[in-house]
Image (spheres, grey):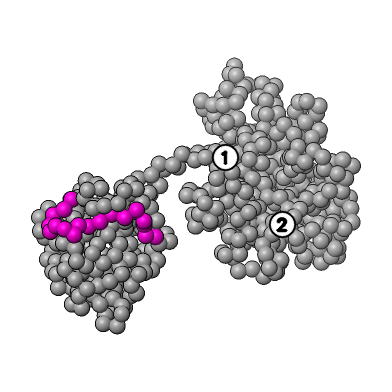
Amino acid sequence: MKKLIYLLMVLGLVFTTACNPMDEIYDELGSEEAVISGDAVYTLTDDDYADLKIPNGFTSVDEAKSVLPNFLASLYPVWGKDSSVLVEYKMADGASNLEEINAYANAEKYSLTMDDYVASGSDVMGFYPDVKPSDFLDDILADKMVGEEGDIVLVKYAQYLEDPIITTTTNFSIADNFSYGSATGDLTTITTDWLGHSGGSPFVGYATTSLSMANYPSSNVGGSALIDGFGSEDVNRTFSPKSSGTVYLSALVNLSAVGADNGTYFFHVMDDGTNFRGRVGVKSDGNGKMLFGIGASSSTLTFGANAFDFDTTYLIVASYNIDNGTSNLYVLTTAPATEPETPEATNTGNSGTTIERVAIRQGFNGPTGSIDGVRVATTWNDIMVDDIVTDVQGEKEYTELYYMYNGTYWNPSIGVYYLSTEDYDSMGTASGQPGRYNNFDNNIHPNNYIPAFLTLKYPYAQESDLLIVMYKYYAGSTSIKGNAYSVLDGMWQGSSPSLQFGHDGTKWVPDNTIKYVLASADYELVGNGYYNNFDVRAGKAEETIEVRLEKINTILLKNFPGSAEGQKYNVFYNVYSGANEVWNMKVVLQGSAYVLQD
């Protein structure tokens, strides 16, 4: 299928002759009969080359100038004067670049996710400034992309230019790591955070060693609480009351013994009195292992079917739904980010209890062991996350670059450069310049900018150096295109050339005219921003063509500082002549100023 992208600007189509306000078309060089006019960018296809009987491309620019006018006449049979087409073609000796360029233009895209950045030690959506992204991109792509030899991917990532300022919040009610110093003893003596509410000696103890589990935030921090099967004391810690929804409680436990076959509870939440909810208990399975159970509001527990080992650290998570009285229990060997679908055990009891304390219980013939990392929250996520990032401040830049798969590894593509936002901006950010929308288009052709950009970026490039430059191009929609640039006679030049043709009213001829429509910023630049037009009424500021030409010079010289001698522009602008109209002025660059075309 031929790739044909139209950027149409219909200047006028007259169907009647009398009393039609469009019968007079204002032009700085005189009135003309209205015609159908259009603009397009067209890339010759393999079928086109076959039809033109030059399957390998043109052998010279002169050949292209000779052949293409008749081709355009058949392609655009109804277009007339002031139409323009930018034709992209290949040279017979440069055809090999086209396949490579197309492969990069059609490459799969991958943007790094938060999980990818975490691999580098980042806690935000971007690499930190002291990180070298290439140290991680190979492994990230190997993990996320299934590649075959020769596959290409365009990778996008962000990197902070300075250490970001991170604002976080905590949504849990309690996160107790038992960090109470280096002295051991009774827990309620070591700290006032925990208070006794029942029983006496033997007391709940405090040890300076901690329990750990990967990815659980309260892991391997501080010390731990000690419970004994012959202990008597029960202790609790208060938090802000919860009167609706679900309360989650979690802890790391490592139990060495269980004294009773019928089981008893050792961990729960409660109100400000003696209403205990979400009781977590344990009993022997009779075969040297233990079973965990849950009681919503009763000391009679529902036990799970899975047997667990002694002297092993597990993460227990229990929940109590205040609204319906249901409690679930999970016994885990990892810390999952989301709540598992199937609990170890479920029990239903009384609802409606306001929960405001978490408790550790010692019961006769209960378990002996350690408890650590006690957490209470209202969601599973808040149990598993220490701090939630709510805001990140800091400047960062985005980079996009190509990687190719060699059959074993993903490696950066050599000799290919993808223009960044900063690159477009360096070519000018005003109206009519690449940095305005960070792309090229029919009026902002890459070959007018990229050679100068490469000269500045690679000042020490050597003769015959070759670089494929990929860029964004807008023609109704934005796509990725590219060209191969090489150093010839000390200057960067595109090796996949293009020619612009214009219709002179009779035929298509090579023409470098760029059509340009003044934007709001242009009127602002020359002091006409209030109405965004030129007032051409008698005695008004822009009545004469000389004044308008001076203002258009100011605009073009600012917007297109790199234009070459002889560059032509057809500038369309708003005027007020007693009515709102659109006029145009055709100019050409001669020396340091634009003059009216002959």
Asked whether 95 or 328 is in front, the reply is 328
Predominant SS of the magenta segment? loop
Q: Which residue is mark 1?
A: 161
Q: Residue at the location (18% across, 50% down)? A: 195
The C terminus appears in which quarter of the rendering? top right
Identity, as a three-letter code, of the amino acid under mark 1: Leu
Which residue is located at x 79 percent, y 49 percent?
485
Report the span colored magenta. Answer: 194-212
Q: Secondary structure at mark 1?
A: loop
Q: Is residue 202 inside the magenta stretch? A: yes
Discs 1/2, front = 1
Please tell me whether residue 191 is drawn above or below residue 311 in the rendered image.
above
Q: Quadrant of the N terminus?
A: bottom right
Residue at horizontal 89 percent and vertical 56 percent from the top: 59
Q: Is residue 200 above or below residue 150?
A: above
Residue 366 or residue 72, whichever sits in front: 366
The residue at which mark 2 appears reads as: 413
Asked whether 425 falls inside the magenta stretch, the response is no
Q: Quadrant of residue 532?
A: top right
User: Crowding at label 1, few (<14), some or many (≥20) Cα neighbours within 10 Å?
Assistant: some
Instruction: State the image quarter where residue 42 is shown.
Output: bottom right
Judged left or right of residue 334, residue 14 is right
